[in-house]
Amino acid sequence: MKINKLITVALLSVSLFSAMQVSAALKTCEDEIKETNTFLTEKGVPPVNNITDLATTLRNIKNFGRLPDRYITVDEAKRLGWSGQASETLWGVKKTNNRWIGGDIYNNPALPANQAWLTADIDVVKGYRSPKRVIYSLSGPQRFITTDQYQHLVELEPCQ
């Protein structure tokens, strides 16, 4: 009986240690975004401006399986009074004030077909949507960003 408990404790310790090593090997989301920004800049593509907001969004998706509370879908924003026009700020409508667009389905044949893909705005300024998005799936760790209205997709490495 004691031997079985000892083996169980040893296996749990090894599993915990392995999990800690994998976690420690992951870059911070801020570092991953900075590296991606360097790549984008070298390619002549606009970088992400607000690294902290994107890092928070990536962590929220990874840790809780959802976007931060500030996000609402296009349909929800329209129900609350937003026109959906690029020239109209979401923050000009009281019910959508300080909200960002996110959680809408995104289809692109270049992405793995075995997952449902969603998109969310990044680099929102004063409620106006930018051409920058994070593309994510809730069924896997892959994440992509585009900073030029889906012309280029860049994969982000998993981060913490």
Image (spheres, rainbow, N blue to C red):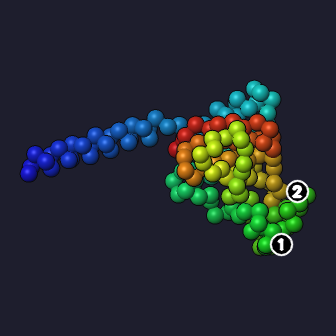
> SS of the residue at dot 2?
loop
Q: Residue at x 59, y 58 (%)?
A: 66
**Residue 57's x, y, as percent?**
62, 52
Please state if 50 lies on the left or on the right of 65 as rendered: right
- Provide residue 116's location: percent of width, then percent of height: 63, 51
- Residue 101 visible in the current orientation: yes
* Nearer to us in this view, 8 or 115: 115
The numbered dot on residue 30 is none
Closer to the camera in the image, 73 or 159: 73
Q: Which residue is mark 2?
A: 86
Answer with left or right where residue 111 lies relative to residue 139.
right
Amino acid at circle 1:
Gly
Nearer to me, 41 or 72: 72
Residue at the location (77% across, 46% down)? 132
Instruction: Specify few, some or many for label 1: CA neighbours under 10 Å numbering under 14, 14-19, or 20 or more.
Output: some
- In this rendering, the answer to whether 151 lies above or below 97 is above
- Residue 25, image x, y percentages: 46, 35
Q: Residues within 10 Å of mark 2 (few under 14, many from 20)?
A: few
Q: CA distance from mark 1 to mark 2?
A: 14 Å
Q: Residue at x 77, y 53 (%)?
A: 124
Q: Which residue is mark 1?
A: 81
Residue 97 visible in this rendered orientation of the protein? no
What residue is drawn where x is 79% and y is 72%?
79
The answer to the question of whether label 1 and label 2 lie on touching residues, with beta carbons closer than 8 A, is: no
> How far across and down, in percent of the image, does residue 67 sit?
62, 58
Instruction: Pick out the residue farthest to the top.
Output: 42
> Mark 2 is on which residue type?
Ala
Q: Total label count?
A: 2
Labels 1 and 2: the sequence-earlier one:
1
Task: State the residue lying farthest toward the left.
Answer: 1
For the residue labelled by badge 1, is the local secondary structure a helix, a strand or a loop? loop
Q: Quadrant of residue 101?
A: bottom right
